[in-house]
Image (cartoon, helix red, strand yellow):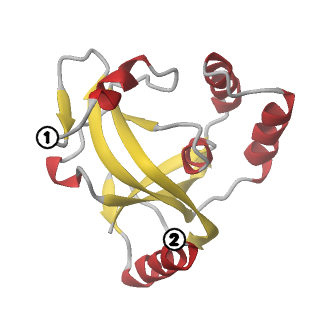
Amino acid sequence: MKALTIHQPWNWLIAHGHKPVENRVWAPPDHMCGKLIALDAGLRHDGDALHFATEALVQLGQVDAAAELMIREVERNHVRGAVEAVATFVGAVHIDGCQLRALASIGPEVHAMRAHPFAVGPWCWVFAGVRALPEPVPCRGFQGLWELPEDVESAVLAQIERAA
């Protein structure tokens, strides 16, 4: 299974259904469309994330005082260096809308991601069917798309099967 390392708290926001896109400067490979991908919580923390995330969630009508406190708590105690979730990669859209890579049958939801508050691009990778793991699986992340070690993949898949 391929994996993508994402800084915190962005990975947590994806894992818990608040952020359906991940912004990258590079286009994903075509063969990834429709595939399950592991979302690895990186060791690095984005210090500017709380302010941006709160503004985006307000735009989406998904934040209240309790949610903001939760985001602050997650920012202090988030998972690092572990696979935190899995998702199906459904496509990517370039922020200017001139380029699109997606499944042939993809609907307008991928195109609509260009206007999503979390979509800053230039490439917005779109995820569906995101599932947070009950127990994050420790793993060293890498840049780009990378292959999960067999033991980590087995542990991730076992949790998905138990949760189904």
- Residue at the (54%, 76%) spot, across then down: 159
Give me the C-alpha separation between circle 2 and circle 1: 33 Å
The percent coordinates of residue 82 (x first, y second) are 56, 65
- Residue occupied by mark 2: 139
Question: Is residue 160 found left or right of 57 in the rendered image?
Answer: left
Q: Nearer the viewer, residue 18 or 119?
A: 18
Sequence-wise first label, 2 or 1: 1
Question: Is residue 69 found left or right of 37 in the rendered image?
Answer: right
Vertically, is 100 above or below 18? above
- Residue at the (18%, 40%) spot, across then down: 105
Amino acid on which the number 1 mark rests in the picture: Ala
Amino acid on which the number 2 mark rests in the picture: Cys
Q: Quadrant of residue 46?
A: top right
Vertically, is 39 above or below 53? below
Q: Which mark is residue 151?
A: none
Give the number of marks.
2
The percent coordinates of residue 126 (x first, y second) are 37, 39
Label 2, residues with CA under 10 Å away: few <14, some 14-19, many ≥20: some
Nearer the camera: disc 2 or disc 1: 1
Vertically, is 97 above or below 50? above
Label 1, residues with CA under 10 Å away: few <14, some 14-19, many ≥20: few
Q: Are marks 2 and 1 in contact (CB under 8 Å)?
A: no
- Residue occupied by mark 1: 104
The percent coordinates of residue 58 (x first, y second) are 68, 19
Which SS class for mark 2?
A: loop
- Residue at the (43%, 82%) spot, across then down: 154
Q: Nearer the viewer, residue 130 or 53?
A: 130
- Residue at the (85%, 35%) spot, across then down: 66
